[in-house]
Image (cartoon, rainbow, N blue to C red):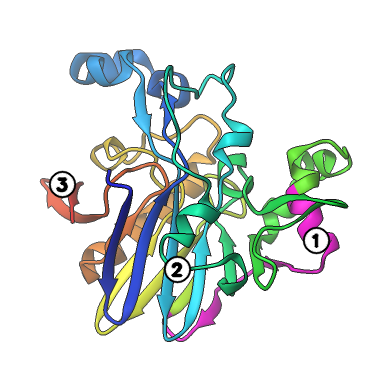
Amino acid sequence: MSKHTTFSIGSAQVTLLNAGNMRVRLADEYAVPEALWRPRYADLFDHPSILPSLSVYIELHGVRVLVDANDYHATVTPDSPYALADYTPPPPLVAQLATLGVQPEDIHHVVITHAHWDHYAGTTIPSDNGFAPTFPQARYYLGAADWRNAENQRALQMDTSLEARTLGVLWKEGVLQLVEAPTQLADGIDILPAPGETPGHQVVRVQSGGDTLYIIGDLLHHAIELTHPDWMVSWADAETMGETRRWLLQDALTRNAALIAAHIATVGRLEQDGDGLRWRDA
């Protein structure tokens, strides 16, 4: 994908920012028996895919929203299984936003789609006192069920953990808002609960001028999941994920909504493909 992809949803300006590409082997991630994928998708599953780690910047009527914030340089170290050989990642998100004329203090809202490291690692930065919110004037939004998750709570008790120096710092600073229900950030920008990937997974819907955009986080990791909607990552709650996919994807199809998934490089729209759906680059 290009360095920045910017497009309009009605009056909203939307920009994709890539924290960095990751090496992902679908055969290791998916709860799909080899006997099902090998006949048709051997090349896709046998070889690692290169997937982005996307953030989305939205500006609508003077309200500035960032969805997800990874710190690739801090989390995808050379010994990480997600690291690519001889790869130079893009500049940090703050530097990428600066090329758009956006400073950290300009951001009003930061939505964390869910509590997986590649979606929140960039929400804080080192400071004289340890760590501080990267976007100092923003409120941060996390699904309450992800915050309450026992694994997350254990990690928060460890001072050196990523959770403690990011989500824990935001909590102590009083800027982390736990989301239990649909929440409006501004006229035309809403957070909607969309569990399955995690219990507190959430998406952002942008509506303006008759156009709709869904920023779906990890509701889909790869477009193959549209062809096979029962295929999903091993850690997902399959029943809940299936329910979320059914209502959201049907709504997106009905509205001809644009879609942004955190690990699919292009903006897409859905098309009917026989009894299923497929991703069309928009």
In the rendered structure, which disc, 3 or 1, sits on the residue that comes first in sequence?
1
What's the residue type where badge 1 is placed?
A: Trp
Q: Where is residue 80 in the image (x, y as percent from the top left)?
A: 57, 21
Disc 3 to disc 1, C-alpha distance: 45 Å
The reply to whether callout 3 and callout 2 are in contact (CB within 8 Å) is no
Q: Is mark 3 on a helix, strand or loop?
A: loop
In the rendered structure, which disc, 3 or 2, sits on the residue that comes first in sequence?
2
Residue at x 45% of width, y 34% of height: 89
Judge left or right: residue 73 versus residue 244: right
- One can see residue 148 in this view: no
Residue at x 27% of width, y 72% of height: 8
What's the residue type where badge 2 is placed?
A: Gly
Residue assigned mark 2: 101
Q: Marks 2 and 1: which is nearer the front?
A: 2
Q: Magenta region: which residues?
A: 166-188
Residue assigned mark 1: 171
Residue at x 20% of width, y 67% of height: 256
- One can see residue 79 in this view: yes
Which residue is nearer to you in this view: 170 or 3?
3
* Residue 40 within the magenta-colored segment of the rendering: no
The reply to whether callout 3 and callout 1 are in contact (CB within 8 Å) is no
Residue at x 35% of width, y 28% of height: 50
Q: What element carries label 1?
A: helix
Q: Position of residue 63 (x, y in %)?
A: 49, 80
Q: Marks 3 and 2: which is nearer the front?
A: 2
Instruction: Specify the label residue 275 is tagged with.
Output: 3
Q: Where is residue 237 in the image (x, y as percent from the top left)?
A: 54, 41
